[in-house]
Amino acid sequence: MSKDRTLELIRQGYPWAARLRRGAVAVPTRLLGRRAAVVGGPEGVRRFYDPRLRRKGAFPPPIKLVLFGPGTVHGLDDAEHHHRKALYVDLLTPEAVAALGDRAAQEWSSAIRRWAGRDRVVLFDEAVQVLAASVLGWGGVPVPQDELPHRARQLAAVVDGFATPGPVYVRAALARRRLDRWAAELVRQVRTGRLRPAPGTALHVAATATGLDGRLLAERTAGVALLNVLRPTVAVAWFVAFAGVALQEHPEWRARIAGGDAAALDAFSQEVRRRYPFVPVLAAKARAEQDVLGVRVPRGGLVVLDVHGTDHDPAHWPDPDRFDPERFLTGDVDPDTLVPQGGGGVCTGHRCPGESVVLTMIAEAARALAGLEHTLPPQDLEVDLTRMPTRPRSGVVLAVTPAEAF
């Protein structure tokens, strides 16, 4: 019987699954006390989204309850999952995402004006505030101006600490509890008529959402649905930090984006998602004993998708650790080789319906930064791959040219 490798995953972080697989599509192991198969590559991605697997019970409760919340769509399967996911698919139309992008562009412009007179700004911290202001205003969520920084930090704290043992996890759990209460109260106020968000906004959609039985979701569950729009949008701050470094290290792409090259901007945003890590793995649970690409997994066993390794697979991404947006300008990309936010179909599977939001938010940040005269002064940009999620250690400090801040 193979040893349990849970501690290895915690200690090694992002490279763990790829090291374990060593190029294989699937390997047996034990994780969280259960027999498991770790899979990767396009064949592994397709097998991971096979209906013989389910999401309920796959995530460890300490992670699931802090990051996603109780009753979340991420832990649902079959008809219930399709019904709940339709809420997000219907909300995040191309027109709605474009409107969110417009708000983000305005917020970045305002932020850059606020940087006037400041020698340095921390890009990650600024991105948290910009993204929160963008999604809260777009989502119909009323937040007084003096409360906005607090809510932004809470949303970021949940993401920052959900997978890190110790004080940072405690902060994440406390932030989650407070956000759950706040979101449930917003839903209650909409249902009692004290708040009247515009139809089609995230708050209105969450407050009026129903279950398969046609009844309104419980207030807390509806609040979780709302937070699952707000929190992932603020989480784009991690990608924005990496984008800030990439723009500095690759001035040719910065120049193309500043010059209005839309194709270059899209390719740059895609490469940020591929190259820079967010989560190392995803997990599913076997409904019944089954063969998973040559590995026998018992009922209740785990199938673990190597997300980071798949996005860095040299068989599909030559020289995978090199930042090269050109990869996305030279032909179609197999969606099963690019899974920073999961794979499968958006409407029929578990692929994140918010992919377009992430790409739009990265693009608006990159556009704003590309047009800003700034440098990166000496700082600690090391990326700790054992920290989940990770980002450059300094948060990416920008030295802004004073004339450009006005």
Image (cartoon, helix red, strand yellow):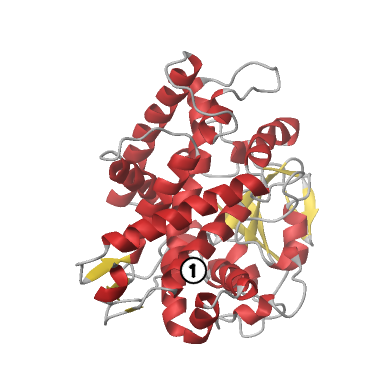
Q: What residue appears at the point 43 percent right and 74 percent down from the top-left corner?
A: 371
Residue that carries the numbered disc 1 in the rendered image: 367
- Outermost residue on the top side: it is 192
Image quadrant containing the C terminus: bottom left
Q: Can residue 389 be seen in the rendering of this structure? A: no
Residue 123, position in %: x, y? 34, 65
Q: Which amino acid lies under the numbered mark 1 shown in the image of this protein?
A: Arg
Residue 272, position in %: x, y? 54, 70
Mark 1 surroundings within 10 Å by alpha-carbon count, few (fewer than 14), some (14 through 19), many (20 or more) = many
Q: Can residue 93 be seen in the rendering of this structure? A: yes
The one of 393 and 192 positioned closer to us in this rendering:
192
Image quadrant containing the N terminus: bottom right
Q: What residue appears at the point 46 percent right and 77 percent down from the top-left corner?
A: 246
Question: Image height check: is 364 above or below 193?
Answer: below
Question: Image height check: is 227 above or below 381?
Answer: above
Secondary element under disc 1, as helix, strand or loop, is helix
The one of 382 and 97 positioned closer to us in this rendering:
97
